[in-house]
Image (cartoon, rainbow, N blue to C red):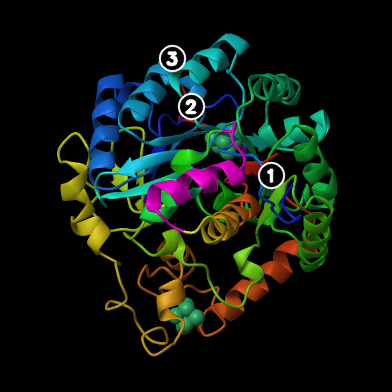
């Protein structure tokens, strides 16, 4: 079981594909160090083995080192998902001493021009490269996360080469998933069918070139697939998400589903929440509608993503509209055709509410 | 080194970022690495307990054969097969 802890929604970058919700938690609302430490203990007690410390930018939390130490004390395998901004050499050394197991560093692009345009933060790429060098010097195992979309899919070979150069053991090439801010920017991010086909070939070739040095995971864009992905490997089966304010979500985008009641770690234990209404809502396959109920893929994809069904059909119980068997599939194909035949509109950059810190 | 065949003179070690853990909830030892948690059976656990980065597979197999009073060749073949599987996934490094 794995838990994603969104320590904060604060982030110096403002990527237009950020998976955070549009309505973000402000600093005053964040869980305290002691509260997170208790949550880590409760997570271990219900069987969580892997902890992903994410955000926003987790390094925006001044207590990050203490949080890592608390996670290790709880017995969790601790992975830091970061843009690298705010991780000074001294802080990285402290994280090393605190027992941080692994780092996942995001790449917005392979050149300062593209990366700083996408991240909306001038000088960000240069600082990220300094952090990457420091990560290598300290010997942290490293995975590079690259979110790919219309503006950077052409740079895929360079992206993979950069990951190898930075000493990563693994790169996760994830085509943008349309949740959170990415959904708002869909027309600007939507790749063309050609780009997706080329990307698949590039990945296949790179897997041969880098065999034994760099593992390449590829998440294809589901709008171009015939069947949906199993969201969270099945709702309420192996994963949970904690928002910065302690709200516990079965999936990071689940807040867009109306009617679901999300409990908070401030009011209940994780063990109770795991059995509570939000996690039970779409667990298993009994609730599935047709055509899923009589489909033999139902134990494979559980009808796909609830948040995608909500966003595109208005009904969170519907078959994921990505599926070829969904009556809404034609809408997605029209959408792709429309969005990729026009020049991409300007990005709407992610930002906290005005006046936020 | 992932493609080449593993031999008895290879020295296995757990790379940084991979470690043994006892899962108290499921009451089983697990090998934890990035994005992976591998449940171990008692034999897997016994082998990985011997992996110290210093001794080669032959020495490890010798010790296990003595401890479990089993034929050394058989143990060695099992150890090689097990470690090869982990090496392909970079959960064990061999030198
Ligand atoms: S996706 Fe970009 S904006 Fe969102 S948390 Fe990550 S680095 Fe920050
Ligand atoms: S009909 Fe439902 S279960 Fe079958 S492939 Fe489509 S989404 Fe999956």
Whether labels 2 and 1 belong to a single chain: the reply is no
| Label 2 near ligand 1 (CB < 8 Å) | no
Density class for disc 1 (Cα within 10 Å; few <14, some 14-19, many ≥20) is few
Classed neighbour count for the residue bearing mark 2: other residues with Cα under 10 Å, few (<14), some (14–19), many (≥20): many
Q: Which residue is mark 3?
A: A62
Distance Cα–Cα, label 3 vs label 2? 16 Å
Is label 2 in a helix, a strand or a loop? loop
C-alpha gap between disc 3 and disc 1: 48 Å
State which mark lies toward you, 3 or 2: 2
Assign a secondary structure to mark 3.
loop
Residue at image mark 2:
A100
In the rendering, at what x and y percent does residue A284 appear?
A: 30, 71
- Label disc, if present, on residue B9 of the rendered structure: 1
Same subunit, tags 3 and 1: no
Q: Report in which chain the residue with disc 2 lies.
A: A
Specify the subunit that label 3 lies on.
Answer: A
Percent position of residue A173, x then y: 68, 51
Discs 3, 2 touching: Cβ within 8 Å: no
Residues at circles 2 and 1 in contact by the CB criterion of under 8 Å: no
Residue segment shown in magenta: B53-70
């Amino acid at each position: 079981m794995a838990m994603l802890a969104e320590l904060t929604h604060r982030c110096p970058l403002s990527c237009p594909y950020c998976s955070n919700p549009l309505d973000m938690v402000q600093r005053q609302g964040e869980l305290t160090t002691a509260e997170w430490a208790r949550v880590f203990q409760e997570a271990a007690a219900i069987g969580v083995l892997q902890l992903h410390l994410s955000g926003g930018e987790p390094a925006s939390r001044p207590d990050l080192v203490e949080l890592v130490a608390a996670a290790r004390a709880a017995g969790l395998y601790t992975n830091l998902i970061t843009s690298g901004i705010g991780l000074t050499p001294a802080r990285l050394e402290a994280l090393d001493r605190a027992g941080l197991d692994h780092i996942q560093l995001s790449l917005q692009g392979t050149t300062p021009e593209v990366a700083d345009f996408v991240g909306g933060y001038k000088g960000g790429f240069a600082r990220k490269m300094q952090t990457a060098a420091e990560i290598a010097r300290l010997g942290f195992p490293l995975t590079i996360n690259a979110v790919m979309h219309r503006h950077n899919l052409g740079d895929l070979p360079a992206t993979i080469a950069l990951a190898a150069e930075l000493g990563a053991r693994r790169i996760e090439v994830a085509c943008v998933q349309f949740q959170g801010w990415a959904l708002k920017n869909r027309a600007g991010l939507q790749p063309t069918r050609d780009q997706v086909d080329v990307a698949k070939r590039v990945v296949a070739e790179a897997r041969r070139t880098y065999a034994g040095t760099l593992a390449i995971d590829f998440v294809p864009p589901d709008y171009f697939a015939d069947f949906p992905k199993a969201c969270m490997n099945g709702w309420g089966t192996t994963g949970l998400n904690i928002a910065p304010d302690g709200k516990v979500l079965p999936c990071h985008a689940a807040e867009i589903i109306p009617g679901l009641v999300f409990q908070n770690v401030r009011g209940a234990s994780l063990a109770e929440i795991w059995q509570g209404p939000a996690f039970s809502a779409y667990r298993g396959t009994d609730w599935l509608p047709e055509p899923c109920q009589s489909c033999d893929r139902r134990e494979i994809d559980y009808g796909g993503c609830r948040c995608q069904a909500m966003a595109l059909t208005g009904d969170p119980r519907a078959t994921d509209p990505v599926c070829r068997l969904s009556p809404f599939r034609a809408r997605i194909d029209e959408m792709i055709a429309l969005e990729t035949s026009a020049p991409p509109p300007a990005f709407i950059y992610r930002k906290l509410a005005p006046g936020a810190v | 080194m992932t493609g080449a065949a593993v031999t008895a003179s290879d020295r296995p070690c757990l790379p940084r970022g991979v470690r043994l853990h006892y899962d108290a909830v499921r009451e089983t030892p697990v090998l934890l690495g990035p994005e992976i948690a591998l449940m171990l059976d008692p034999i897997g656990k016994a082998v990985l307990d011997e992996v110290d980065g210093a001794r080669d597979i032959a020495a490890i197999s010798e010790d296990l054969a003595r401890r479990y009073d089993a034929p050394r060749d058989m143990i060695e073949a099992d150890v090689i097969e097990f470690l090869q599987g982990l090496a392909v996934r970079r959960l064990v490094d061999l030198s």
